[in-house]
Amino acid sequence: MTEKQITELLQSADRAAGPPSFGRISAHQIRRRLRRRRLLWGGPGLAAAAALIVLGLTLWNRDLGPQEVVVPPEQEKIASLETQVKQLQAQTQATLELVNDVLARERQTQQLDALEAELASIPDPVEELRKQTDKTAFTLLYRADRLYRELNETESAVEAYEQIIQLFPRNRWADVARARLLEIRKPLINDSKTEGDSKCKSRSV
C-alpha cells in the first residue's frame, strides 16, 4: 500500500470520527483515559488495532478493484500502422507474384513466336526438292536443245532427251523432251514410208 493510500485512509477515518469535542475534564478522567490507552495499545488492544488496519487495507484494495491497463494513444497508432504495413507487404508480395507470372507467360509466348518464325523461314523440303528437280530437268533439256538445234548432233540430242524422260517422267520438261523426240523422228518416219512405197512400186513394175 502506498503512502498516499495510507494518508487517504487516515483522512477518511478522521472524517468518520467527526470534529473533536472539548469540555471540562477532571484529573481523574485523564488518569482513566491513560489507563485505557495503555490497556488498548498493549497486548490484545494492539492486535485488535492491527487487525482493524489490515481489514481497512483489504477493504480499500477491494474498492479499488482490478486496475485496467490503459494503452496510450501513441501505442495504438503504432500497432495500427504495423498492421497496415503488414497488409501492404502481403498485397505487394501478391502483386509481384502476379507480375512475375505474367512476365513468364509473356517470355514463353515470345519464345514460341520466335520458334514459329524460324520454322516458317525454313523452306518446305518437298517444295525444295520439286524446285531442284525442275531445275535439273530444265538444265538437261537446255543442253539437249543445243545439241539438236545449234550443234546438229541429233543422236546425242536424242540420247539427252531420252535421259530426261527416264529420269523425270512426270516433269513438265519431260513432256517437252517427248515433243522434241517426236519432232526429230517424224522426218525419219516419213522417209522410211517413202522408201517403202518406192520399193513397192519398183517391185510391181
Image (cartoon, rainbow, N blue to C red):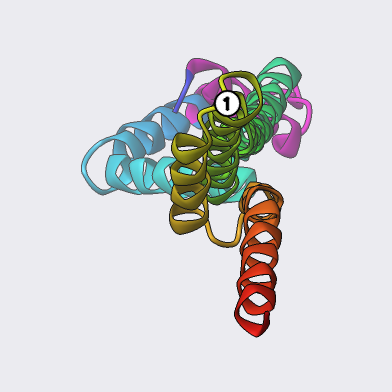
Q: Which residues are magenta?
A: 3-28
Q: Residue furthest left?
A: 43
Q: Is residue 89 or residue 77 the one in the foreground?
A: 89
Q: Residue 10: horizontal and vertical position, in percent?
A: 59, 27
Residue 112, located in which quarter of the rendered image?
top right
Magenta part mainly helix, strand or loop? helix
Note whether 43 is above or below 13 in the view shown: below
Q: How many marks?
A: 1
Residue drawn where x is 35% and y is 33% of the image? 35
Quarter placement of the C terminus: bottom right
Residue drawn where x is 60% and y is 61% of the image? 170
Q: Is residue 16 magenta?
A: yes
Q: Residue 67: horizontal and vertical position, in percent?
A: 60, 40
Q: Is residue 57 or residue 15 the one in the foreground?
A: 57
Q: Is residue 183 or residue 108 the one in the foreground?
A: 183
**Seen in the image, is 85 located left or right of residue 119?**
right
Numbered disc 1: secondary structure: loop
